[in-house]
Image: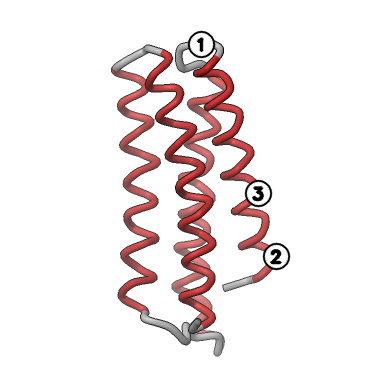
Amino acid sequence: MIEWLTFASIAYAFVAGLISVVAGIRGNPPRDLTVLGTLSVAVVLVVLLVVAIVQPLVGNAASGNVLEFWLYLITAIAMSIGVTIWALVDRTRFSTIAMGMVSLAIAVMIVRMSIIWAGA
């Protein structure tokens, strides 16, 4: 994977998650900032998906378990989209906190995907 993109993705997911968790703790229901933040984490994951498809074609193949990498990536995309749908259906502060926790979990998942890609 591209190192700077990986670090930027981790930072973005972490910040989006932190904003949503703080908003949920303050009692705010899902708003544009939190919903769009979580959806944009899904967009970042789709960018990582495209990068993961292109990188082996240009000579930067994954050194670790490719199946594990792809399962992490697909699960992360499903989690971000699923929690966003939940937040649009259940407009309570708990869904805002859930969006934040999922974004924070995705930040950790991106770290793990980077480790898998490197073969460690």
Q: CA distance from mark 3 to mark 1?
A: 23 Å
Front residue (pair 101, 38): 101
Place of residue 114 in the rendered image (x, y in percent of width and height, measured from the top left): 53, 70
User: Quick check: 97 above or below 119?
Assistant: above
* Residue type (three-letter) at the residue carrying disc 1: Asn
Residue at which label 3 appears: 11
* Residue type (three-letter) at the residue carrying disc 3: Ala
How busy is the neighbourhood of tag 3: few (under 14 within 10 Å), some, or many (20 plus)?
some
Front residue (pair 56, 8): 8
Residue at which label 2 appears: 4
Task: Count numbered badges in the picture.
Answer: 3
Label number found at residue 28: 1
Residue drawn at x 38%, y 19% is 94
| Residue 33 placement, left or right of 66 | right
* Residue type (three-letter) at the residue carrying disc 2: Trp
Q: Nearer the viewer, mark 2 or mark 3?
A: 3
Q: Secondary structure at mark 2?
A: helix
Residue drawn at x 36%, y 12% is 91
Quadrant of image for the N terminus: bottom right
